[in-house]
Amino acid sequence: MKAGLAIVLAAVLTAVGWAPATDARVTEAQPFSGRAERFDELRLLTVTHWGFDGAAHRGRLVVNRDAAAAMLGAMRTLFRLHYPIRQMRLVDAYGADDHRSMAADNTSAFNCRFVAGSGGVWSEHAYGRALDLNPLENPYVTESGYVSPPAGAPYADRSRHLQGLIHRGGPVVAAFAAVGWAWGGNWPWPRDYQHFSATGS
């Protein structure tokens, strides 16, 4: 199934004429806009989001068809909140390498990959039912102090209140909870502060 989804994603990118540097700044003030394009089991979403530069940008995500409405709803709320997203590019811009995407502070959803260190268990990202949001500011942290991406180490201290950080009980968590998605920052250990998913895993 995952190989099929990856093939479909490649077809999606070809069909829409995708190139890695397509993230565009929205030069005129405008309300949130979001649309979903249909491709078999996947949906290519194009959404408006605020950047760390205070300007509106367009980004793209690939999600499962059953996750498209929820994702658009959550993104609409984040836009209304003026929550900043560093960038939102398809993981193919990083060769589908999760570590490269995280190091670039890239927000992404679908990625045909296993759970790290799981011995072959498919990630919810492989089903298009998970999102990693501002991974540098919201790193994956273990109880022993391992942080991924490594440059996210200063943000492992969740008492900080900086641009893009997600906090327990805060509006970003509430935006996803409103569409039925759970936050990895609520896990006991490890805590995945960037991670939201439809299944909670």
Image: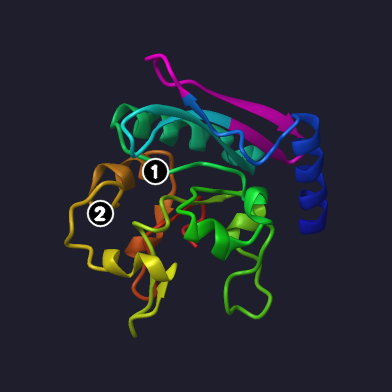
Question: Mark 1 or 2 closer to N-term?
Answer: 2
Q: Residue at x 34, y 73 (%)?
A: 188
Residue 107 location, x and y as percent? Answer: 49, 48
Location of mark 1 (residue): 176
Q: Residue at x 30, y 32 (%)?
A: 82
Relative placement, left or right, of 136 versus 82 is: right
Q: What number is the disc on residue 167?
A: 2
Q: Is residue 77 magenta?
A: no
User: Between marks 1 and 2, how big is the CA–CA gap?
Assistant: 13 Å
Dividing the picture into quadrants, the one containing residue 53 is top left
- Identified by mark 1, the residue type is Phe
> In what quadrant of the picture does the N terminus appear?
bottom right
Of residues 160 and 80, the one nearer the viewer is 160
Of residues 45 and 199, the one nearer the viewer is 45
- Identified by mark 2, the residue type is His
Of residues 69 and 161, the one nearer the viewer is 161
Residue 116 location, x and y as percent? Answer: 57, 73
Identify the secondary structure beneath mark 2.
Answer: loop
Relative placement, left or right, of 194 versus 13 is: left
Q: Magenta segment, which residues?
A: 26-45
